[in-house]
Image (spheres, rainbow, N blue to C red):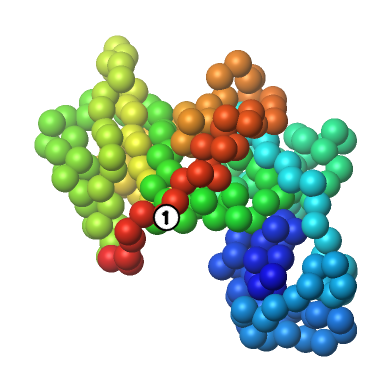
Amino acid sequence: MRLQKYLAYCGVGSRRKCEDLIKQGKIKVNGKIIITPGYKINPEKDFVKYNEKIVKLENKIYIVLNKPKNYICSTTDEKGRKTVIELLKPKIKQRIYPVGRLDFDTTGCLILTNDGEFAEKIMHPKYGIEKKYILKIKGRLDENKLLKIKNGIKIEGKLIKPKEVKVLFKKEKNDIILITVTEGMNHLIKKICETVGLTLIWLKRDSVGIVTTKGLEYGEWRFLTKKEIDFFKKINAKVWRKK
């Protein structure tokens, strides 16, 4: 088995991240530093170490959390802020990490796992996984700004064209909007709003693929169903290239 694939199966990270770790000289096989991605190992005979700890295949865990505000999507935080991992303890003892990030003040659907290959399917745009966001803005989304978003806008030199943009509800003074994207850029929805001059009041992620937080209060979580797990595992990469 290729080393980066083994590392991903062990939950170290996505295959791409594992390739980077190998190139950086952070992986040892039988006591020897390996810097060549694609190096083949025998999982039954070879000893693989990352950060001087033996890496072993683990039982795979797949969780969806309804993330509340004021939690960091990380396993640790140097500033001492609360992390989403704390919401899973003490019931989940295995090492697990969030797939992608939701901002400190953003709520909603967050998937966590120790399966690097599974995480890659969700994060990389070549798989086209839809992420639906619901947001409240100050005032109204006028037709001009709606068309700008629908037709695609340049953010950090990249054309971002959401799959869906629509007003869900018109409150007394503010609109509630749905935006569906397949990109994985950090702070993407906030950047879309900033680019067209919308003031964001609150933001939550409603779903990732077919996974939702229906029935979960903020801070609650559940294991993914077999149907949900299979949905991601069966998806193949689409024709994709960097723009």
Name the residue beneath numbered marker 1: 237
Which residue type does callout 1 highlight?
A: Ala
114 left or right, relative to 178: right
Question: Residue lying farthest left?
Answer: 144
**Alpha-carbon neighbours of circle 1 within 10 Å: few (<14), some, or many (≥20)?**
few
On screen, 141 above or below 14?
Answer: above
Is residue 185 visible to us here? Answer: no
Q: Quadrant of residue 111?
A: top right
Image spot of residue 142 (x, y percent)? 16, 30
Choose between 5 and 153: the one closer to the eye.
Answer: 5
Task: Pinpoint residue 118: horizontal percent, then vertical percent.
Answer: 59, 50
Residue positioned 63% across, 20% down in the render: 216
Horizontal arrangement in the rendering, residue 180 relative to residue 83 (left or right): left
Q: Position of residue 4 (x, y in %)?
A: 65, 70
In the rendered view, tell whether residue 207 sits above or below residue 122: above
- Identified at 40% across, 29% down, the residue is 134
